[in-house]
Amino acid sequence: MTIRVVLVDDQAMVRTGLRMVLAAEPDIEVVGEAADGAAGVRVVTELEPDVVLLDVRMPGMDGLEAARRILATDSPTRVIVLTTFDEDEYVAAALRAGVSGFLLKVGPPEDLVVAVRTVAAGQGLLDPAVTLRVIESFAAAPSPDPARAGQLAQLTERETDVLGLVAAGLTNAEIAARLYLGEATVKTHVSRVLLKLGLRDRVQAVAFAYESGLVTPGR
């Protein structure tokens, strides 16, 4: 199965570089490009790719607003934010918009390929360089979101435990060992948590855990 990708970046040279990296992979095809957020939304709406790579800072409509508009529809497209800027405000805003991945442009090309495949497979991904910043950003919120906190009541005690460990960055295998469960059972719990809370993937689960107050600094 070929993964269809759209590139949205205002720098033509960056788009060319991204296209070259991805075109070298037999299972990935770049099907469209755009130089700003508004054009990116139009291209994604028309082509419905599996993954769109969005730069954060672009003239006119930026990548965050483009992500919000794409994810507000029923489009199956998953969004990876790709940027040279790693300030907390961009990371947090991107995750709140519902993106499935966040990568820095300074990373090696192979990280980009892995990210596209990971997100296309329905999983979330954060660049290791920004994972800690993401956690700190949400942990520093002044108080839990009452609406988010209320949604935790939908989860069973075991599902709540699993969500907390997902937010701590543990893999399914590590969670299984911690809770003395089978890895398949953990995978089922994670799937149920995402379904009940209306989350796309583990990346959004991390954000939810912090915003709801389930996970706090020091825990």
Image (cartoon, rainbow, N blue to C red):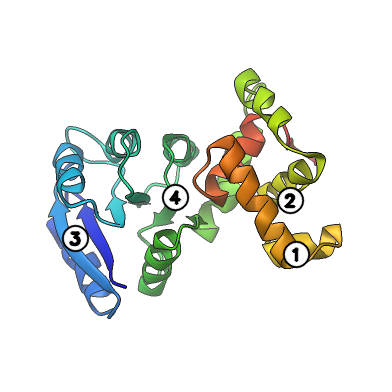
Q: The disc labelled 3 sits on which kind of residue?
A: Arg
Cα separation, mark 1 vs mark 4, equals 22 Å
Label 1 element class? helix
User: Looking at the rendered structure, which numbered label has been put on residue 15?
Assistant: 3
Q: Are marks 2 and 1 in contact (CB under 8 Å)?
A: yes
Cα separation, mark 3 vs mark 4, equals 20 Å
Q: Position of residue 87 (x, y in %)?
A: 45, 41
Closer to the chain start, of discs 3 and 4, is 3
In the image, is residue 196 above or below residue 114?
above
Nearer to me, 178 or 144: 178
Please give the name of the residue rendered at 70% of the width and 50% of the height, measured from the top-left corner.
Answer: 168
Closer to the chain start, of discs 2 and 1, is 2
Q: How many marks?
A: 4
Cα separation, mark 2 vs mark 1, equals 9 Å
Q: What residue sits right under mark 1 in the picture?
A: 174
Q: Are marks 1 and 3 in contact (CB under 8 Å)?
A: no
In the image, is residue 59 above or below residue 20?
above
Q: The disc labelled 2 sits on which kind of residue?
A: Leu
Cα separation, mark 1 vs mark 3, equals 37 Å
Q: Is residue 87 visible?
A: yes
Q: What residue sits right under mark 4 in the picture?
A: 100
In the image, is residue 17 above or below residue 216?
below
User: Looking at the rendered structure, which numbered label has been put on residue 165?
Assistant: 2
